[in-house]
């Protein structure tokens, strides 16, 4: 069980400011489902067999009759895996996070090539944040299976996707541009969120959550 996460990280919440963290693909059998590029949904026991740049490359599904189906990541638009109960034992993963979701989205790090990336924000809302592998590996030290993460959370970056089409890398050094690009089109957010005008990277995750709630 110690190595069941490919990447084991935690959700950090400091002074009420949420920063979204990846949990990683689950490589042991767990309940879940996948959606294929043909829009077929397949449910059963799901595990990720291999990854390329932390994107699932092969997936194995055990269906109800115990048959095993092997699929390539390129054949899927979504992977959903339920977190096993023991994953919460350290307290690092909040109980309200039940599933690990990978969605096929354009990756600006790869010339907008569609890739399966871990979604860090809850479903719904016009802004989605995804795990930016390239942006993390420069600053992160991983300890597999022990839920240990060493990182300066201010240096983390994300793949941001707005309205399912406009994908770009959101990072601290470009907060002015990120702020205008993501939040500037919603007067309700600017008027009703107390710190909407601040260009503070520490509160970026919280601002995304507020925007998704206020700006439908």
Image: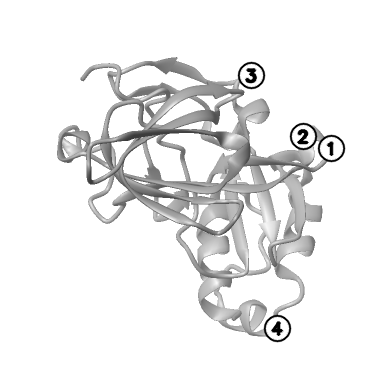
Against 104, is 47 above or below?
A: above
How far apart, in angstroms, are the residues tagged by discs 1 and 2? 6 Å
Which is more toward the observer, 195 or 121? 121
Q: Is residue 70 left or right of residue 90?
A: right
Q: Nearer the viewer, mark 4 or mark 1?
A: 1
Q: Earlier in the sequence, mark 3 or mark 1?
A: 1
Distance between mark 3 and mark 1 Cα atoms: 20 Å
Task: Write the residue at 55% across / 80% down.
Answer: 214
Q: Please state which of the two labelled residues, at mark 3 or mark 2, is closer to the viewer.
A: 2
Task: Give the SS element for disc 3.
Answer: loop
Quarter of the picture containing the C terminus is bottom right
Q: Which residue is mark 4?
A: 187
Q: Which residue is mark 3?
A: 138
Residue under label 1, please give it: 111
Report how far apart the C-alphas of labels 4 and 2 lie in the structure: 31 Å
| Helix, strand or loop for disc 2 | helix
- Residue 151: x and y, percent? 49, 25
Earlier sequence position, callout 4 versus callout 2: 2
Q: Identify the secondary structure beneath mark 1.
A: loop
- Dot 2 surroundings within 10 Å: few (below 14), some, or many (20 or more)? some
Can you tell which of label 4 and label 3 is closer to the viewer? 3
Which residue reaches farthest right? 111
x, y (%) of residue 213? 51, 75
Q: Mark 3 packing: few (<14 Cα in 10 Å), some, or many (20+)?
A: few
């Amino acid at each position: 069980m110690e190595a069941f996460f490919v990447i084991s990280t935690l959700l950090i919440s400091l002074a009420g400011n949420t920063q979204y963290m990846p949990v990683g693909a689950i490589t042991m059998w767990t309940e879940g489902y996948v959606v294929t590029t043909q829009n077929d949904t397949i449910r059963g026991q799901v595990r990720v067999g291999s990854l390329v740049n932390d994107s699932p490359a092969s997936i194995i599904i055990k269906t109800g009759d115990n048959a095993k189906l092997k699929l390539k990541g390129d054949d899927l638009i979504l992977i959903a895996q339920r977190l096993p109960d023991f994953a919460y034992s350290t307290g690092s993963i909040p109980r309200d996070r039940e599933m690990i979701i990978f969605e096929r989205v354009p990756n600006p790090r790869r010339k907008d090539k569609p890739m399966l990336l871990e979604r860090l924000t809850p479903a719904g809302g016009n802004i989605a944040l995804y795990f930016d592998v390239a942006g993390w590996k420069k600053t992160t030290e991983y300890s597999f299976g022990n839920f240990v993460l060493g990182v300066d959370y201010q240096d983390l970056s994300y793949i941001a996707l707005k309205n399912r089409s406009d994908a770009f890398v959101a990072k601290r050094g470009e907060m002015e541009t990120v702020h205008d690009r993501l939040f500037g089109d919603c007067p309700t957010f600017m008027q009703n969120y107390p710190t909407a005008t601040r260009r503070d990277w520490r509160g970026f995750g919280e601002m995304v959550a507020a925007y998704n709630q206020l700006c439908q």
